[in-house]
Image (cartoon, rainbow, N blue to C red):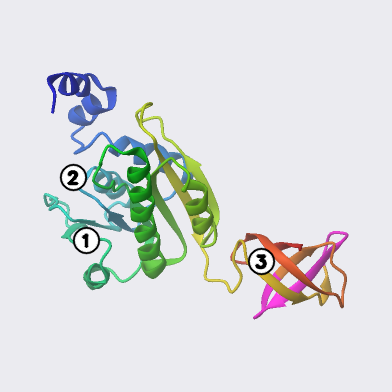
Amino acid sequence: MSRRWLKEKRKDHYYRKAKSEDYRSRASYKLKQLNRRFGLIKKGDAVLDLGAAPGGWMQVAGEAVGDTGIVVGVDLAGIKPFKEENLITLQGDITKEETIERIRAVQETFNAVICDASPDISGAWDIDHFNSVELGRHALRMAGQVLREGGSFLVKVFQGSLLKEFEGEVKREFEFVKVAKPKASRKESSEVYIVAKGLLKTPVRYGDILEVEITEQGRRPGEGIAYVDGYRVIVEDGQVGEKTRVRIKKATRRAAWGVKV
């Protein structure tokens, strides 16, 4: 580390604030700001923090869940234990299946999965972007295995050509998805956060193309309703008795909306 880098770090507002408020990382304020804006973590929740070292996000999540919740933090590096009994640390590789089993031994399911992990930085922008998205995909897969229906997901990725594609993958799994950058992120950083709420367990997802038969008329003029395994699909410009091909543009836990293709 250069002396110049260390000097700039010590001048950083959030670095100094973290030191004065006893947070382990300036990144704590990123989660504070994102949670304040999107309401991802609530009192009594079970939260899984992936890539949790040194533990700044665990501290913030612990404040949000209170004494009745639990926060499990996992990182390839060791995380210094907390005095709070409901803040539990595990050392493990979040890309490995065996890590999921160790997590489930502590807590079977979660209300929120959060991930502020970064890949090893190579200095080559396109490689770092690719690796950050791949790390995000590992986090998304783990979230799909341990999140409760309706749960929330938060993951950091670096901006680049694969961001839209990965955002679309997250949209297939959640009701609400937005890309955000908290104020505490450094201006020069390419990092952004994908915020997702409402994990879906439905038979139809965003981006699906389906053959459906419209069996009911919707409440609004021109809306037709079809069903897929009992799940309602609302089709624009649909007529009762019509068989048509639709692309799903939005899905929630109660219904999906599609347009003809």
Q: Which mark is residue 93?
A: 1
Q: How many other residues sit within 10 Å of disc 1, few (<14), some (14-19) or many (≥20)?
A: some
**What's the residue at 18%, 56% (across, down)?**
76
Q: Secondary structure at mark 3?
A: strand
Secondary structure beneath label 2: loop
CB contact under 8 Å: marks 3 and 2:
no
Residue at 31 percent of width and 48 percent of height: 61
Residues shaded magenta: 218-232
Closer to the N terminus: mark 3 or mark 2? Answer: 2
Seen at 26% across and 54% down, the residue is 67
Task: Give x and y (percent) for residue 170.
Answer: 49, 57
State yes or no: residue 213 in magenta. no
Identity of the amino acid at label 3? Ala
Q: Residue at x 50, y 58 (%)?
A: 169
Q: Is residue 66 left or right of residue 203?
A: left
Q: Is residue 41 something one can see in this rendering?
A: no
Q: Secondary structure at mark 1?
A: loop
Q: Amino acid at mark 1?
A: Asp
Q: Is residue 198 above or below residue 185?
A: below
Answer whether labels 1 and 2 touch (C-beta < 8 Å): no
Residue 91 at x, y percent in the picture: 15, 59
Q: Is residue 228 magenta?
A: yes
**Quadrant assignment for the C terminus:** bottom right
The residue indicated by pointer 3 is: 255
Circle number at residue 54 = 2
Tag 2: amino acid: Pro
